[in-house]
Image (cartoon, rainbow, N blue to C red):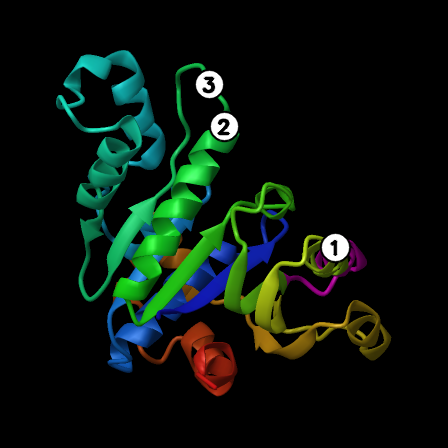
């Protein structure tokens, strides 16, 4: 069974960047097979990983909705969708990638979430590590896109607004009884959160990831974070706390 790392947090905290850096480090550690799962409809993870998406779950549903006649005789719609999702997995350099996307046609958006969750549940057993980049905010939790994970990694900045958002995520995880083996807090930037806020939130604070000019430069150029210099400050910081994120019990 794969080890699942789910990343959550409010918008602008660098969730997607952190997801890509974790994939990069797991690859370099030769930790095993890796599935990067982009559960954010904006589909930014492929770009920062330097991968080109074949398809998304949303576009697959749109295609089947427009052309139901393409479903082979004797095959159920759900089975055909599941097959299409499996064939849409992109093979990257040392990892695989599956993206949720956003359906353009009419229909319940929750259906896309349910399909992605179902597909992820079946795929997890095929990989040693699964890194999930969730959409910003609490929506993915309230719709239960993420039902269980080995590590829930909440990303915040050191502001009160950011920490309050992290607190709400932690409370919602408890309310929805989402199973998380570890619930960790990472702060973006060099400033550490106040100790009273760490205690109030109830997440295990494991450290900071500084603003990295090399990451900013790569982002501006539209390049891949997989090409990030090994001496980059963000990677150096992540190496110090990485084992707490992906260490198996």
The magenta span reads 156-166
Depth check: give the residue in front, 126 or 96: 126
Q: Residue 201: image x %, image y %?
A: 78, 68
How many other residues sit within 10 Å of disc 1, few (<14), some (14-19) or many (≥20)?
A: few
Q: Secondary structure at mark 2?
A: helix
Check if residue 47 falls in the magenta segment.
Answer: no
Residue lying furthest front in this view?
74
Q: Secondary structure at mark 3?
A: loop
Main SS of the magenta segment? helix
Evaluate if marks 3 and 2 touch, with contact meaning CB atoms under 8 Å apart: yes
Check if residue 160 falls in the magenta segment.
Answer: yes
The quarter of the picture where residue 2 lies is bottom left
Q: CA distance from mark 2 to mark 1?
A: 23 Å
Residue 175 is tagged as 1
Q: Secondary structure at mark 1?
A: helix
How many other residues sit within 10 Å of disc 2, few (<14), some (14-19) or many (≥20)?
A: few
Q: Residue 3: image x %, image y %?
A: 40, 71
Q: CA distance from mark 1 to mark 3?
A: 28 Å
Image point (32%, 75%), residue name = 26
Left/right of residue 118 with respect to residue 53 in the rendered view: right
Q: CA distance from mark 3 to mark 2?
A: 6 Å
Give the quadrant of the N terminus.
bottom left
User: Disc 3 marks which residue?
Assistant: 107
The quarter of the picture where residue 228 lies is bottom left
User: Disc 2 marks which residue?
Assistant: 109
On screen, residue 13 above or below 184:
above
Depth check: give the residue in front, 238 or 130: 130
Image point (56%, 66%), residue name = 153
Image point (50%, 77%), residue name = 245
């Amino acid at each position: 069974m794969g080890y699942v790392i789910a990343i959550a947090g409010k918008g602008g905290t660098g969730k997607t960047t952190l997801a890509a850096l974790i994939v990069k480090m797991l690859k370099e550690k030769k930790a095993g097979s890796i599935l990067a799962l982009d559960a954010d409809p904006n589909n930014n993870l492929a770009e920062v990983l330097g991968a080109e998406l074949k398809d998304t779950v949303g576009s697959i549903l749109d295609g089947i909705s427009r052309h139901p006649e393409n479903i082979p005789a004797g095959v159920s719609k759900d089975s055909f969708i599941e097959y299409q999702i499996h064939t849409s997995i992109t093979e990257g350099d040392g990892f695989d990638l599956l993206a949720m996307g956003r359906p353009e046609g009419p229909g319940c958006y929750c259906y896309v979430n349910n399909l992605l969750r179902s597909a992820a549940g079946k795929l997890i057993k095929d990989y040693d590590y699964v890194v999930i980049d969730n959409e910003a905010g609490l929506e993915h939790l309230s719709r239960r896109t993420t039902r269980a994970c080995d590590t829930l990694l909440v990303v915040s900045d050191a502001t009160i607004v950011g920490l309050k958002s992290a607190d709400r995520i932690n409370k919602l995880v408890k309310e929805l009884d989402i199973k998380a083996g570890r619930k960790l807090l990472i702060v973006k930037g060099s400033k550490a959160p106040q100790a009273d806020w760490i205690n109030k939130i109830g997440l295990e604070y494991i450290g900071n990831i500084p603003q990295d000019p090399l990451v900013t430069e790569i982002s501006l150029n539209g390049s891949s974070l997989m090409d990030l210099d090994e001496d980059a400050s963000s990677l150096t910081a992540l190496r110090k706390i990485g084992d707490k994120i992906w260490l198996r019990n």
